[in-house]
Amino acid sequence: MIRTAVTEDLQLQVLRGRAPHNADESALIHGTVTQIERYASGVTILRICVEQGCKFAYKPGQYIEVKASDGRFRCFSLATSCLHEGCIELHIRRVADGLFSDRTVRGIERGDVLSWRGPFGDFGLHSDTVSKCAVFLCTGTGFAPVRAIVEEAFSRGWTRPMSLYWGGRTEDDLYMRDVVHSWTRTHGNFQFIPVLSRVGTDADAPRRTRVHEAVLHDFASFADVDVYACGAPAMVATAREALSSQRGLREEAFFADPFGATAPACATASNNVDVAQIKVNGIAYAAPLNESLLGALRCRGVAIPSVCGGRGACGTCLVEIDAASRARLPPPSRDERELLECLPEATDCSRLACQIRVDASTSGLALSVP
Ligand code: FES
């Protein structure tokens, strides 16, 4: 029986008991959800067994694109170094009231079948470099590909020192730290430095700062270090800049996978859907309802950057809401507020276009896109 989980602007086709049969799906890989773990931080871990007859292989650090019923794809890194008993593992962080990661993933059950394409990407382990040690930086579910890469290093018998700096707001964000602690016990060349941006009571006594600042503090020079970074693009960009300019990191020794995703496609941009009138830089656009502001305006040709694909993780979709229009919008969620606080260019009028839903009350909104 086909079950379709409806989200605000994304529908993930979830099928029970059989694979989808749409004409264009012959190249997709299908798998059955066999295990679901939900963490307090809002991260869900899915283990998905590849269906018999589907050939699927990947390199640690790569990602796949999971297919949605409206034809759109969401990107997720593969979180183990290889198939474990024929299964892949995905780490999915919930974005408040959002899209795929919230409503759809919340409804997934064991036995559901998902479809994806890939693998993609060239983020991965580089054994051929001359550096004497490796530093892994990640935030949140940026841990997923890092886990795959570190496991690969262990299996290749790496003896060079490896340090993992995993950042989050609270200890809950470091949702798999028991796995990482087990690495420290079994591999003398590996150390784990948890980094939290909020004060807490974690027995691990992690550092209270940001990931790149912790690394800057610990290393006088990066001339002989390889850096692998995965997480929010802002973190990746800041780390790269700071480590290069202040610690001599070589460009060829920085390997990164900022959270990337395909840009939201125009799902409902036909001319006969209900629209809200929205002014951007003084020009009026008819934006389809029930889209994110980001998706709705991009449907109408407004160029708004979106590195994270609308996941509320990158801050590149920043827009300035006219003061007179602000009352039309509900206040930002805690997640949006916290990301805005991290963006130096954000003002009191700034919002993330991917986090605003276009509805009837949005009509008349005026904003500017830098
Ligand atoms: S598109 Fe990344 S935060 Fe909005």
Image: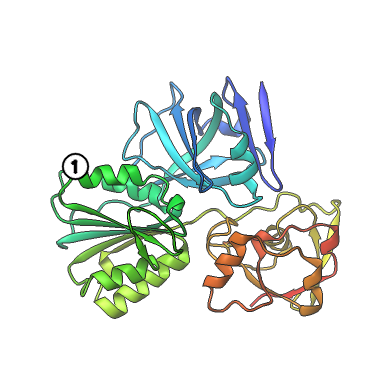
Q: Is residue 153 visible?
A: no
The residue drawn where x is 53% and y is 63% is: 314
Is the image coloured rainbow, by chain, by secondary structure, or in one colour? rainbow
Using the rendered view, name the quadrant where residue 225 is placed: bottom left
- Lateral position of residue 233 relative to residue 268, left or right: left
Using the rendered view, name the quadrant where residue 115 is placed: top right
Name the quadrant where ligand 1 sits: bottom right
For label 1, the SS is helix
Amino acid type of disc 1?
Answer: Thr
Residue 24, x across and y down, in percent: 59, 34
Identify residue for label 1. 186
- Pick the residue in front: 46 or 259: 46
State whether label 1 is within 8 Å of ligand 1: no
Q: Height in image: 125 above or below 113?
A: below
Residue 57, x across and y down, in percent: 36, 35
The residue drawn where x is 41% and y is 56% is: 201
The residue drawn where x is 67% and y is 45% is: 10
Q: Is residue 117 visible?
A: yes
Name the image quarter holding the C terminus: bottom right
- Pick the residue in front: 72 or 173: 173
- Lateral position of residue 271 relative to residue 312, left or right: right
- Lateral position of residue 207 relative to residue 185, left or right: right
- Pick the residue in front: 71 or 112: 112
Residue 120, x across and y down, in percent: 42, 47
Using the rendered view, name the quadrant where residue 296 is placed: bottom right
Q: Height in image: 105 above or below 129?
A: above
Residue 338, x across and y down, in percent: 56, 66
Mark 1 is surrounded, within 10 Å at the Cα level, by few (under 14), some (14 to 19) or many (20 or more) other residues, namely few
Name the image quarter holding the N terminus: top right
